[in-house]
Image (spheres, rainbow, N blue to C red):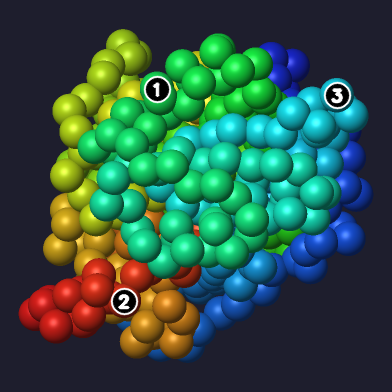
Amino acid sequence: MSTSSSVDKAPVSPEDIKTAQQRIAGALRPTPLLTHPLLTQALDADVYVKHENHNPTGAFKVRGGLNLIGALKDDLRSRGVITASTGNHGQSIAFACHREGIPCSVYVPVGNNPDKNAAMRAWGATVVEVGRDFDDAREAVEREAARSHVRYVHSANEPLLIAGVATLAAELYEAIVPDVVFVPIGGGSGAMGMCLVRSALNLPTRVIGVQAERADTFTRSWRTGTRVTGPHPETFAEGMATRTTFDLTFDYLARALDDIVTLREDELADGVRMALALTHNLAEAAGAASLAAAKKRATDIKGKIVACVMTGGNIDGATLRRVLTTSP
């Protein structure tokens, strides 16, 4: 699939992204875009890491939550909001609602990352555990939202959320014009934001998505042009563990995304170890997936300017111990 340089059909405009930058400025500082000599040496490329793991919630999604919740009308604020998440989107909504004094409920899968659950509760959210995976939790939220008429915040099908997330791309492209950007795909908001800003600026950058092999519904849908639903995702990269695609992000990325890399579980674990050893940053599996993908495409990116989006650092202790004690 070739990249579209047109923004005429984009559901989020450059003006929407500029408004989002203004709306979130009081809560967030631009995240660091850093080079790490060991990473550059290992990949034999000019590699920059966009450290979204340095945000207040430890993940990029906080940008979308702040923009969407900040724009809510007064009547919706009094009723509160409800959403589904494996953690980072939920923390985003919880953080934004805490700042605005808005009630918030987050549905998560049973057995979800305990550290993420604790963080959401610490921001004042009511956390409800239901179902085997994110999509079970999402379906439960949709039933509850239809019954109670509370504002349901979808993790991807929200233009205001996408505009907020796209501010990370605006920061990145203002600093450098990379040949290639690697960005993880779960619901697709991060990749969509990266493509939106790239197209608005008419840059030559190739945007490459990253998925887990065991949660590759988006990949199979994108490659065939036919949207499919996958089985329960058996991956420890919870930020990418979805079994469906979503209308807003998939429809745009179907024509805007340049390529996708899929990673085995051992490659995802290697990404976490790379983040620690080569950048001295703690990253969860989805957050480090861009590094692992760059390693997998090392031959293609040799000598090029490469950006890797480290989308989050919220890995729980038990998972981290397992990754660090597993032989590469």
| Mark 3 lies on residue | 75
Report the front residue among 208 and 88: 88
**Which sits earlier in the primary sequence, circle 3 or circle 2?**
3
Kindly identify which residue carries mark 1: 139
Q: Secondary structure at mark 1?
A: helix
Nearer to us in this view, 159 or 194: 159
Relative height, residue 202 to residue 11 (above, below)? below
Question: As drawn, is 295 to the left or to the right of 178?
Answer: left
Q: Residues within 10 Å of mark 3 (few under 14, many from 20)?
A: few
Q: As displayed, is residue 283 above or below residue 1?
A: below
Looking at the image, which residue is at 55% across and 12% down? 146
Tell me which numbered mark, 3 or 1, is placed earlier along the sequence: 3
Count neighbours of disc 2 (C-alpha within 10 A) and say few if under 14, some if 14 to 19, many if 20 or more: few
Q: Which picture quadrant has residue 137?
A: top left
Question: Label 2 is placed on what type of residue?
Answer: Gly
233 with respect to 146 (left or right): left
Q: Secondary structure at mark 2?
A: helix
Q: In the displayed structure, would residue 148 be above or below residue 28?
A: above
Among the 4 quarters of the image, the one containing residue 258: top left
> Dividing the picture into quarters, in which one does residue 236 lie?
bottom left
Q: Quadrant of the C terminus?
A: bottom left
Q: Position of residue 281 (x, y in %)?
A: 46, 81
Q: What is the three-letter code of the residue carrying label 1?
A: Glu
The residue beneath circle 2 is 317
Mark nearer the viewer, 3 or 1 = 3
Q: Residue at x 34, y 87 (%)?
A: 277
Tell me what residue is drawn at x 86 percent, y 58 percent: 25
Closer to the observer: label 3 or label 2? 3
Question: Dots 1 and 2: beta carbons under 8 Å?
Answer: no
